[in-house]
Every structure is written in C-alpha cells, then in structure tokens.
Image (tube, grey):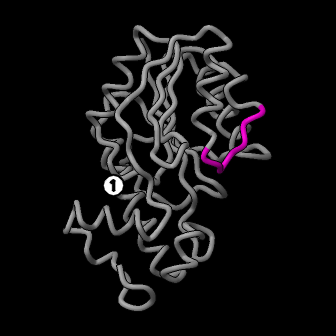
Amino acid sequence: MKSALIVFQKNPVLRKVKTRLANKIGDEAALKVYEALVEITNQSVKNCRADSFIFFSDFIPNLPPNTSNQFRIQSGADLGERMRNAFQEVFEMGYDSICIIGSDCPLISGEVLDLAFNQLHSNDVILGPAKDGGYYLLGMKRLVPELFEGINWSTDGVQAETLEKAQNLSLSVSKLPEFYDIDTVEDLSLFISQFPEYAYLSPSDGPTL
C-alpha cells in the first residue's frame, strides 16, 4: 500500500496556540509548550515509514530545504472540513492508506504511527482515542466524508460520534492505545512528571504545576 501521513500544525504564533493553556500559564509559556510539541511530533514523523505532508493552519514558514516533508495550507470552515479536504487532496495524489494526526499529543511515536498503518491493512478505519474524548489519530483507506460531517468538534463527544458514524456505515474500526493531548495545566504536569527532561516547560510565573 502507498501510505501517507498528514500532520496538522498551527503556525506557532503568540496568543494563537494553546489558548486554553495560556489562560492558566500565560501566552509565552503556552507558545513554548506548543513549540516543544511540534518538535516532538516532527521527530516522530521522521521515524515513520509513510510519506509525510505537513498542513499548516495559516502559512508555510521558511523551512530547511533538506526536509523530506511536503507542505500545504489547511482549507475549510471548521476542523472537520479541513481534515476532509486534506484527506481528499492526498488521496487524489494516489495514496491508498492515509492517517492524520495533530501536534498536541507528545506520546505519538514512530512506532505508534507504523502500528496504525499496519492495522489499517485489515481495517477500514484506525482511531487513536484521546483521554479528553477526542482522537489523536484517524486513518482510512478511502475518503469517508461522513466521518467529518455533523460532529461537535472541540467537545468530549468527538470520539464517540465518530465511532457511531463508522458503525452506522458498517466500517471495521481498530483502536490504538489511549493517549492524552496537552490542553490543560494538569496535562502539562502529567507530561513533565513522565518526561522530566521537559521540566523547562514548567512556567516560572503563574500557577504552579
């Protein structure tokens, strides 16, 4: 199978990323957290065997020319439409096995990504459940637009609604391990406790982690 990985990334701009976290730890600290998450994500992408496409939220930044990633800009009115459009664009390039991730989950590794593509061989849909009720990964072998329609995005019902739609369409679904995104101070505290090398992300002012 010809596999592709879509990565959704927000351009790391002050006061435009990790806004919920910023309300607790400040804009600059939240930006630092997001930049670290992007670095972690990019390293995992390098360790994945699939071709990678980075879809930025607003613009394509100046990047080193030796990267193997391909770059695009997201298009669509909401998250569902943006993901659907990205899947459609990459499927039209001839890929027949595509997964999408964001840049908020620090536990996604190259091994997890390869596992997702391996499981996609024998399933219609792969879903990586997030602890907040969303998902950190979605994979499919053909575009299923229904999975992006009528979903209450940015709520704790995203995962359940997506799985219900897949079931109604008689699609076989395989789940990956459940991980957490970093959206709250509690998430950040958990991450730092598990990976002390990122203790520098603990804000020096504002609420104590």
Image coords of residue 180 (percent x, y): 41, 50
Residue in view at x 54 percent, y 43 percent: 133
The quadrant of the picture occupied by the C terminus is bottom left
The amino acid type found where label 1 is placed reads Ile
Vertical arrangement, residue 20 with respect to residue 3, above or below:
below
Image coords of residue 150 (percent x, y): 78, 33
Drawn side of residue 144 relative to residue 34, left or right: right
Quadrant position of residue 52: top left
Residue in view at x 51 percent, y 35 percent: 100
Dominant secondary structure of the magenta stretch? loop
The quadrant of the picture occupied by the N terminus is top left
The residue identified by callout 1 is 40
Vertical arrangement, residue 87 with respect to residue 184, above or below:
above
Vertical arrangement, residue 191 with respect to residue 43, above or below:
below
Image coords of residue 57 (percent x, y): 63, 54
Report the magenta residues as a range: 150-156
Residue 132 magenta-highlighted: no
Choose between 144 and 75: the one closer to the eye.
Answer: 144
Residue farthest along the left direction in this orientation: 196
Drawn side of residue 139 relative to residue 112, left or right: right
Drawn side of residue 155 relative to residue 94, left or right: right
- Is disc 1 placed on a helix, strand or loop? helix
Residue in view at x 33 percent, y 78 percent: 202
Choose between 5 and 130: the one closer to the eye.
Answer: 130
Residue in view at x 58 percent, y 78 percent: 23
Image coords of residue 112 (percent x, y): 31, 34
Q: 10 Å neighbourhood of mark 1: few (<14), some, or many (≥20)?
A: some
